[in-house]
Image (tube, helix red, strand yellow):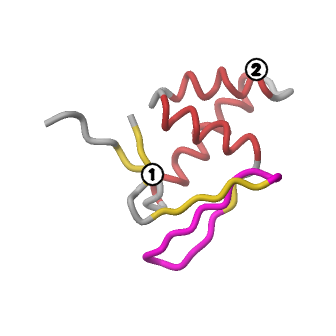
Amino acid sequence: MYTLAPHIRQVETDYGLVLLDEVRGEYFNLNPSGLTVLRTLLTSGDPAEAVEALLREFSVDQAVAEADVTDVMNDMISAGILVPSRGPA
């Protein structure tokens, strides 16, 4: 499972999602497909489910959906936005 880092604020817009990193003062924009990937990762933690969500909601083929999920996931993790959630202690 994943969660947003505690210093990340989010605002949904008509065009996707804007994320603010309050520590770095940087903004990140996700388009609707990026938002679908992020939401799925936050709820299920499973990249395969994010691929399936993209295939259901957008007109893309399997290879494109897989690449998009990988890109969004890697970008959000490397930026410190998406972090592994801690399970019960």
Q: Position of residue 77 (x, y in %)?
A: 46, 52
Closest to the observer: 87 or 37?
87
Mark toward the start of the polypeptide (2 vs 1): 1
Number of other residues with Cα within 10 Å of mark 2, as a class: few under 14, some 14 to 19, many 20 or more: few
Q: Is residue 20 magenta?
A: yes
Furthest residue toward bottom: 25
Q: Secondary structure at mark 1?
A: strand
Q: CA distance from mark 2 to mark 1?
A: 24 Å
Query: Crowding near pointer 1: few (<14 within 10 Å), some, many (20+)?
Result: some
Q: Amino acid at mark 2?
A: Arg
Instruction: Relative to 82, say whether 62 is above or below.
Output: above
Residue at x 45%, y 51% (from the top left corner): 4
Residue to which mark 2 is pinned = 56
Is 27 a magenta residue? yes
Lateral position of residue 4 relative to residue 16, left or right: left
Q: Quadrant of residue 36?
A: top right
Residue 4 is labelled as 1
Q: Residue 80 lies in what quarter of the image?
A: bottom left
Percent x, y for residue 21? Answer: 50, 69
Q: Amino acid at mark 1?
A: Leu
Which quarter shows the N terminus?
top left
Return the residue found at the far left. 89
Front residue of this view, candidates 40 and 47:
40
Q: Which residues are magenta?
A: 14-28
Check the image and report above or below for 29 versus 32: below
Identified at 70% across, 30% down, the residue is: 65
Q: Quadrant of the C terminus?
A: top left
Q: Predominant secondary structure in magenta?
A: strand
Residue 27 on image: x %, y %: 62, 70
Residue at 40% of width from left, 57% of height from top? Answer: 5
